Amino acid sequence: MLTHIDNKGNPTMVDVSVKQVTHRTATARSIVFLPAEVLEHLTNDDIQTKKGSVFQTAIIAGIMAAKKTGDLIPLCHPLGLDNCKIEIGFNEKQEVVIDCTASITAKTGVEMEALVGASIAALTVYDMCKAMSHDIIIKETKLIEKSGGKRDFKRA
């Protein structure tokens, strides 16, 4: 059953008026490949450009985007997040790993906010580094886990 389609096949917001208020959290991850010519600018776990600190700017952009998810995704409820945290690091392949965790006490979840936050942080990394190379690849964005709603989810 598609939750954003009414009985006539028209798009609709999900009616959350009868749902229980619970503490809900979601974490999403984006992975960004940076070529060697970008990674050579890495110092102290960040990349400095003429535009400023890449990862610090990406964190701010991701948080701002997560807060605006209801404005960006047509049928998302506008939410006042209780918290949003973005962490940026590297995996064993030297790819940038961006985790966005959003939380709220509400009648609806925050998966989309976490996904939007991680995505926009990844796009910000691309934007701030593209003068060094256009071989940057945003490889994937996915939900890692969510809790507090009808069913919990945790990726293996």
Image (spheres, rainbow, N blue to C red):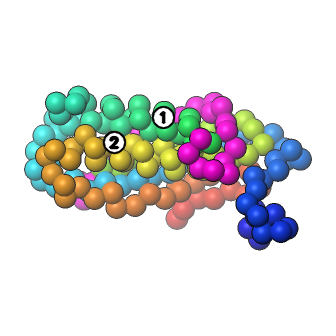
Where is 50 relative to 32, above or below?
above
- Element under disc 2: helix
Under mark 2, the amino acid is: Thr
State which quadrant residue 67 falls in. top right
Q: Which residue is mark 2?
A: 124
Q: Which tag, 2 or 1, sits closer to the chain's start?
A: 1
Residue 121 percent location from the top left of the image: 39, 43
Which residue is at 43% across, 49% downward?
A: 119
Nearer the observer, 104 or 11: 11
Which mark identifies residue 63? 1
Q: Is residue 124 left or right of residue 28?
A: left
The magenta stretch is: 71-95
Under circle 1, the secondary element is helix
Q: Decide: is 60 above or below 72.
A: above
Quadrant in the picture for the N terminus = bottom right
Residue 114: x percent and y percent? Answer: 54, 46
Is most of the magenta stretch helix, strand or loop? Answer: loop
Quadrant of res 61 = top left
Answer few, some or many: residues within 10 Å of disc 1's Cα (few below 14, many 20 plus, some between 14 and 19).
many
Q: Position of residue 16 (x, y in %)?
A: 82, 47
* Residue 31 at x, y percent in the picture: 36, 55
Q: Residue at x 48, y 33 (%)?
A: 64
Residue shown at 34% from the left, 42% from the top: 124
Q: Amino acid at mark 1?
A: Ile
Q: Judge by depth and name the residue closer to the eye, 94 or 122.
A: 122
